[in-house]
Amino acid sequence: MKPAIRQKTNIIIDIAMFIVMILLAIIGVVIRYSLIQGSERWIKYGQNVELTIWGMDRHEWGLIHLIVGIFLIGLLVLHLVFHWKQIVSMIKKLIPDVKNRTAAVTITLGFCILILFSPLIITPKIGDPIYGKGQRLSRNNSSHSGNVLPPSVNDVAEEINIAVKEKQMISNKEVNSVEQEVENSLPEQQVNEVHSIEEHTLNIRGFHTFSQLADEYNISTKELKKLLGIPASVSNNERLGRVRRTYDFTMSDVEAAILKLQGK
């Protein structure tokens, strides 16, 4: 190739690389801050709305981002080919010793090959299901703003489960009757021991809210959330059954926290 044509080709490749790099950066910003993911859409818009730019959603723009990135790699390879003699000359001046130069080039090439094929080697770690996370986050925010969102499928199922359990519970009269019969058949000392144990056994269910627990056991909702590792921003009117799907705790943990706040 003639020097004049080679120089023009180099300039065209460099300009193309610059444009492609800017395009990559712009698409990345659009995907991150404009075409936000599902959980962030629930927080911002109150529901999982569809977001598109020029008729394409974040997944389609992500595919374009990948294609542009591969095109940039191709331009980079051409850039190295057209500047190969200059690159070799600079490496020889930078590392005069042949052995050290060979080792440095080998390590660099190996590292580049490892990065190039890393997507075929790396596998994602599978964690717990995150279904409904966006809905829960949005519902917590809406409880502060006064907006009411439609319940998710999990919430409806929970409500049905709670209703069924409530219907299956023994009436208070029957429970009191059984307890009275047991107490009458036990010595006074054993009856006192039973009452002592019952005082430290709390009847906490998934349909209870933080406000209900605070009123019933005379404790602070803020301190209760703190002991359970729950942010203070979570609404006091949220039911424990819903909150426990987002934050890892059990009803026994709630009972222990309440007893601790009561000083028992």
Image (cartoon, helix red, strand yellow):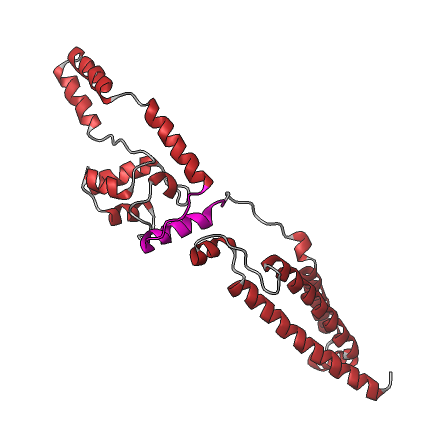
Q: Is residue 207 left or right of residue 16?
A: left
Who's the residue at 46% across and 52% down the image? Answer: 47
Residue 144 colored in magenta in the image = yes
Q: Is residue 115 left or right of residue 83?
A: left
Q: Position of residue 136 (x, y in %)?
A: 41, 48
Q: Residue furthest toward the left?
A: 188
Magenta span covers which residues? 130-152
Q: Position of residue 150 (x, y in %)?
A: 42, 45
Residue 102 vs 234, above or below: the answer is: below
Answer whether residue 133 is visible to the viewer in this image. Answer: yes
Q: Is residue 133 left or right of residue 57?
A: left
**Foreground: 126 or 29?**
29
**Foreground: 113 or 187?**
187
Quarter of image, res 163: top left
**Foreground: 235 or 181?**
235
**Foreground: 128 or 101?**
128
Who's the residue at 48% across and 53% down the image? Answer: 39
